Image: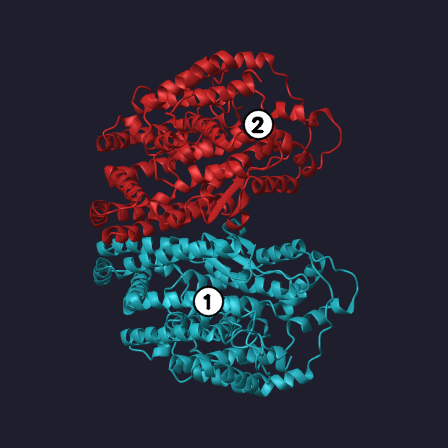
Chain colours: A cyan, B red
Amino acid sequence: MNQAYAQLEEKIGEIKALDHMMDLSNWDESTNMKPASAPNRAEMIATTTGLRQRLIADDAFGELLESAAEGELTDMEAANVRVAARTRKQAIAIPEDLLKASKHAISKCQIAWERNRPLNDWANTTQYLEAVIALSIEISQCLADTFELAPYDALMNQYETGSLQSDIDPVFDEIKAFLLREVPNVESRQISPIPINDTFSEADQLKLAKFSMRELGFDFERGRLDQSAHPFSCGTVNDARLTTRLSADDFTHSLFAVFHETGHARYTQNQPAEWVMQFVGGATGMAVHESQSLFMEMQVCRSDAFLEYIHPILRLLLRRDGSNDAWTLDNFKRMVRHVKRDFIRVYADEMTYPFHIFLRYSIEKLLCNGDLTVSDLPDAWNQGMMDLLGVDTRDDFENGCMQDIHWYAGLFGYFPCYLLGAVFAAQLYRACVRKIGDQSENVQRGDFSAISAWLAENIHSKGSLLEGQTLIRTVTGEELSATSYLSHLKRRYVDP
Amino acid sequence: MNQAYAQLEEKIGEIKALDHMMDLSNWDESTNMKPASAPNRAEMIATTTGLRQRLIADDAFGELLESAAEGELTDMEAANVRVAARTRKQAIAIPEDLLKASKHAISKCQIAWERNRPLNDWANTTQYLEAVIALSIEISQCLADTFELAPYDALMNQYETGSLQSDIDPVFDEIKAFLLREVPNVESRQISPIPINDTFSEADQLKLAKFSMRELGFDFERGRLDQSAHPFSCGTVNDARLTTRLSADDFTHSLFAVFHETGHARYTQNQPAEWVMQFVGGATGMAVHESQSLFMEMQVCRSDAFLEYIHPILRLLLRRDGSNDAWTLDNFKRMVRHVKRDFIRVYADEMTYPFHIFLRYSIEKLLCNGDLTVSDLPDAWNQGMMDLLGVDTRDDFENGCMQDIHWYAGLFGYFPCYLLGAVFAAQLYRACVRKIGDQSENVQRGDFSAISAWLAENIHSKGSLLEGQTLIRTVTGEELSATSYLSHLKRRYVDP
């Protein structure tokens, strides 16, 4: 190991220690902390973030990076240097004052959003969002100059390095054309599920959630399940934390959220443990992270084989084993695959979900390029919802352009990761089955070991060795393409 | 505000942010984290501690401290500078290599202690303790040189600044003489309590714990109660965390631990919120912290008035309202005040508890001065237990010199804080009653508001404005003295 590189690892270790501590603090904030403690917690996080920024921007860190890169390095070490250099480049691209102003504006905007959204109060939110967007545009220009990218690409690359609008647009366009054509057909042919009018105890739902997580490979010796307002997954290879939200009258939404988050958590728990205090030990971007949750939720857990496996189990654990038309396997399949054009992204089914992304992706590009003002945003939103989903959201801001926190939290360029993740997941599932054979029989009897081993070997254990698209290309032998994703939707929804 | 001081506050804010994050991490480790995650968590803490040390040792921080001290300062600001200067002086007194070696030795020793204690395996623990002590001696010499104190005083001052052996020894000696004389008298005259042979559900015990905390002034809007292997209290004014351990067949131990920890937590929750990110905002040493828990547990909650108030409530909440000799008020009083010479410090009653401190205090002074070797420690322990308590612990290391983690965690000079806290608590209680009048009637009907307000005003809200003994002197108008403590014991146990 070269001397400079060894010193670099020590410096990175400090940055990662702060990252992991802040990650734990975020988990705590969502699971344990009382709301009254939030302002001081935010101050601690802001201070720690500033300290982290200073560690990265430090000249000595830059010099170590350069010296380390000149010596001999293994593949993982070289990737570690690459991610570190990129992280530093990004950190010093944005002037400290601009970053502070942006964080300040975001903090105020999030508070306004949280207060005003349930009141459907758009008028008193716009000024905060305008401030966030103006500063995001400035940041995008700094990043664009540094990375020699278009401003929106530069924003997106903060979450998904190496993917550009020019890669994504043709894929998204192909998916859009397919869905605009096929969703009405599916809708007209599908049989509506019989609703389950029933309530389920927290204890029973948690038992089912933990059982499912364990079966799907979550290691409870190195992680936990808790409850929070919105499901999420975080933590490290040694300590993965997953949350869900339970609803008394709808167990399916929570259960599929658990499947989804378990996909994220499996990625985390299979990362290379010896690299946990280094950049290369973490996930390679949000699209690949999303591909792992959607691999689990969509490719595996909404498949016939899985539904056939889990259905008797959930009836047993939820103690609903009597006879009832709503509780048949066929009705359960219809429930979790029902296609319905609706307002809310996070409740959307697999077929209409992409429309929600197309809408946000097109609008946020306009916002970030200065081609759409905040005051014109609701009209653009409604027009998009009408065009894509045929749904009228006029004057319903809460379920319209105020439904997601992303923009109010300054997250521009994040939304495409969700759909890119779904596309990656379909490519990966096909490559997996090509390699290890059809898994229906295994899944049907609850044996996920072959799938798990394949994912661990090919994706999880690689950490950030390769960037998103490069990783997918290396593993699947294919470029980014909508083909696998569309065949998957066709097989499941169009020609079942 | 002087310019240098303003910059100093920013730098201190970074150090406190790391402190608070590490505090949260410790809480999480004891309440949520799985054991398998411990090694990596320890690595994160070690790295963050190293970073914190660098921030404090930084020359620029030292220069800011000097400039800030030269400008005009309020009392709180001046105290903030004083504590910061002291913290820095302490940090740079110990060479980095020595500190690292010590932390490493402690980490190995704690692991050995945890493994060997339940096995009563002393032989395989000694080498680790020897290493810890050798390095603690080196550290004590560095601190002694820097602070111009005797080595043991220098160790003790890490936890209780401004108190010396020469202050403590006469007070401890007076208490010792009193107890050696009076404990046998109390034992011979007391009526043994009738044991409660019963078990209590976690839910009922938690309900009782939360009710009591709320009544004693704990603010659940800014804090929580959780379970852990050992009860403790931590957190900040905005977010105080308290834990307890529940035992199915002994609700009293847990309940009085809750009273004790609530005393600590009230101190935390009443600290000056505007100073939370500064040194002066925290507790002024461990003896005063302990005085707050013992004020609550011993002065208030073991009083006749409180027991008369809580007895019908706990019978109600634990659902034991039938008639039974074990459940009378008199028997309850006997239970929580039963004097019994025994092996274990943390289970000791109020009268025999000081003996456990005398023993540890005298032995650790010898160890730190090199006047006692680890191989002679068990004999010294047994001899001390025989002399002070008449209890033979020969060959019982688990319940003998291996019972407390302190020495194995390198905490030398900590034990006297416990008894000093009890002495402070008695002085404070007397001063409080002198000021606001006898509180028996208020306590008997569950009104703790006058006591709470007095403590908040005179102790809690002061943060670290004054050092331990100075604070007590300012508030009580008395020097450190055993008088109040001994009258308290006399009234409760000797001449009830």
| SS at badge 2 | loop
Q: Is residue B311 above or below residue B491?
A: below
Mark 1 chain: A
Residue A30, visible in the rendered structure: yes
Q: Where, by quadrant of the figure, is residue B91 drawn?
A: top left
Mark 2 chain: B
Disc ID at residue B303:
2
A155, A316: nearer the viewer: A155
Mark 2: amino acid:
Ser
Residue B376, visible in the rendered structure: no
A160, A49: nearer the viewer: A49
Q: Where, by quadrant of the figure, is residue A346 drawn?
A: bottom right
| SS at badge 1 | helix
| For residue B295, side relative to residue A213 (left or right) | left
Q: Is residue A225 above or below residue B134?
A: below
Residue A264: image location, x then y, percent: 50, 63
Which residue is labeled 1 in the image?
A110
Question: Which residue is rendered at x = 24% and y = 37% of the image?
Answer: B93
